[in-house]
Amino acid sequence: MLGVLNWGLGHATRCIPIIQELLDSGYEVILGSDGQALALLQKEFPQLISVQLPGYSVQYAKKAYFFKWKMLLQGPRLAGAIKKEHLVLEEIVQQYAIDGIISDNRLGLYHPGLPTVFLTHQLQVLSGNTTMLTTALHQRYIKKFSKCWVPDYAGNKNLSGKLGHPKRLDFPVAYVGPLSRMQKQEGSSGYDVAAILSGPEPQRSQLEELLRYELKKYNGSCIIVRGLVEETQAVEHDGSLTLVNFMQTKELETLLNGTRIIIARSGYTTLMDLAKLQKKAFLIPTPGQPEQEYLAKRLQKAGILPSCNQEDFSVKQLSKLKVYKGFPQPEEEPSDLRKFFRLFEGEGKLGTHSKVAFYINLLVVRLNDMLHNRKAKA
């Protein structure tokens, strides 16, 4: 099973290449998440079984100053959700005869009887003067897993900086290389500016409101991908500004490759996509989120991508892109994910008994879906 945290869409999108590689390698994959992250994965892989996991229901503060304190106050509720998730996992393992688990930042998806992987770029969790505490708490959960995979390069020329490369570690870590569902290609999207939104509310909506106001002033065609995964794609036109609720991989890939100016959050998955495409972009970190603020400042200092605080953004800021070099061609070759799947060899690939159980459950799920659809039509 591959479980994904529903905290923005980045955790889901960066798992797409892992899922595809697992399928290409002959593994059966069950998807686990909730909310928008689960909806996105279901659209990308409609043929796969998916299970609903308990939501963490993390709420962001409207003001950056209160971000850390609101997160700390939600600690007990978050711990309860993780415990519930861990209990639900046992039922899922039994029902689907699961032989291995990859968890992208879902802290409760560890299992003592199975090979389990925790995927994260945050081995160090920045939170100001409480960084030591938040890092220790996070690493305590990571140690419950068999292995930790970091989607980054191991050397000095990496993307995550001190987030993924702390000085000391006392648990097994493997650097699997940056993960991106995107492929570099030539072509034009027909837009001059593309803004890509994601992340939890209310910050996603606040940035959308700001960009809708500012991009109307831009002398050119602009599009905002709102980051709202819904049943059908909806397109709205407001003068030279186009708004679309979501795009699937190929459509978004074409847009990013063929658009000269990109505006985005400085979330780590977004940066991996931009690096893969070797693109320039203007970054607006989520207010009060230390991880994104750190990554944006790090790239700006290196002369790669410009950024500014959300309250300071205007279309005039986009002129800064001229003096930044953008992401260069990576010096390291992409990692072969298959070699990391060896953790599951003999256990992760379905044996005869497990394969029979898997397909019996698959048949039951499909029959239930058919019955449900018939009742709905009646």
Image (cartoon, rainbow, N blue to C red):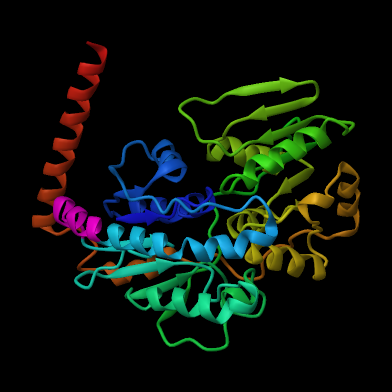
Q: In this rendered view, identify the residue nearer to me: 131 or 246.
A: 131
Q: Position of residue 12 (x, y in %)?
A: 47, 50
Is most of the magenta stretch helix, strand or loop?
Answer: helix
Residue 359 sits above or below residue 5 on the image: above
Give, as a single range, the part of the protein colored magenta: 87-98
Can residue 287 be spotted in the picture?
A: no
Residue 376 sits above or below residue 359 on the image: above
240 lies left or right of 147: right
Q: Position of residue 202 (x, y in %)?
A: 61, 44
Residue appearing at x 77%, y 51% in the figure: 310
Q: Which part of the image, by quadrant, shows the N terminus?
A: bottom left
Q: Where is residue 285 in the image (x, y as percent from the top left)?
A: 70, 56
Residue appearing at x 87%, y 34% in the figure: 218
Residue appearing at x 55%, y 64% in the figure: 334
Q: Which residue lies furthest to the top in this view?
A: 378
Q: Which part of the image, by quadrant, shows the C terminus?
A: top left
374 lies left or right of 316: left
> Image quarter for residue 2?
bottom left
33 lies left or right of 232: left
Q: In this rendered view, identify the residue nearer to me: 106 or 206.
A: 206
Residue appearing at x 52%, y 89% in the figure: 168
Can residue 263 be spotted in the picture?
A: yes
> Image quarter for residue 216?
top right
